[in-house]
């Protein structure tokens, strides 16, 4: 991605650098549209990955739960709940940035 912060200077930035640059107060207005899209895309990707992880853990708990030691089962159920909480928070954040 090419961003012009200064007409005499052009930089190639990674997505994380773009978000950092866009978050700075003096450039927010200039890159507002681009930042919102970049952040929204990143949040969508993270949420999608977390959804896939949640499905895999749920599947593991449901299919193998009867054969697991109780402490392993308890930890996996706790992880499943934690991911669910994280997904709800990410969804709220994504709604604010759209």
Image: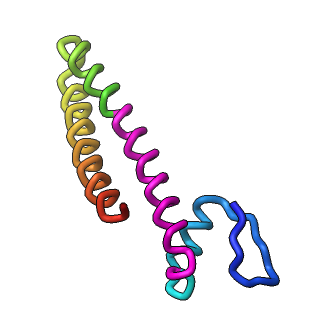
Within the image, what quadrant is residue 64 found in? top left
Residue 52 part of the magenta segment: yes
Left or right of residue 34: residue 90: left
Placement of 13 over or under 31, stated as above or below: above
Which quadrant would the N terminus be assigned to in this image? Answer: bottom right
Q: Which residue sits at x=24%, y=34%? A: 75
Number of marks present in the image shown: 0
Residue 32 image point, x, y percent: 50, 74
Colour pattern of the rendering: rainbow
| Residue displayed at 46% across by 65% down | 36
Q: Main secondary structure of the magenta part?
A: helix
Instruction: Tell me if residue 11 is in the magenta stretch.
Output: no
Q: Is residue 73 left or right of residue 49?
A: left
Left/right placement of residue 45 relative to residue 79 reads: right
Identity of the residue furthest to the bottom in this view: 26
Q: Quadrant of residue 57?
A: top left
Q: Position of residue 25 (x, y in %)?
A: 50, 85
Residue 95: x percent and y percent? 30, 58
Rendering coords of residue 3 (x, y %)? 69, 70
At x 34%, y 25%, the residue is: 56
Task: For the C terminus, give its image quadrant.
Answer: bottom left
Q: Which residues are magenta?
A: 28-53
Residue 42 against residue 50 in the figure, above or below? below
């Amino acid at each position: 991605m090419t961003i012009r912060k200064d007409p005499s200077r052009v930089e190639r930035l990674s997505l994380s650098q773009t978000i950092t640059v866009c978050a700075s107060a003096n450039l927010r207005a200039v890159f507002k549209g681009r930042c919102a899209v970049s952040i929204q895309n990143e949040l969508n990707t993270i949420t999608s990955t977390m959804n896939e992880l949640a499905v895999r853990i749920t599947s593991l708990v449901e299919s193998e739960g009867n054969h697991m030691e109780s402490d392993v089962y308890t930890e996996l159920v706790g992880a499943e709940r934690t991911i669910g909480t994280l997904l709800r928070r990410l969804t709220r954040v994504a709604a604010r940035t759209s």
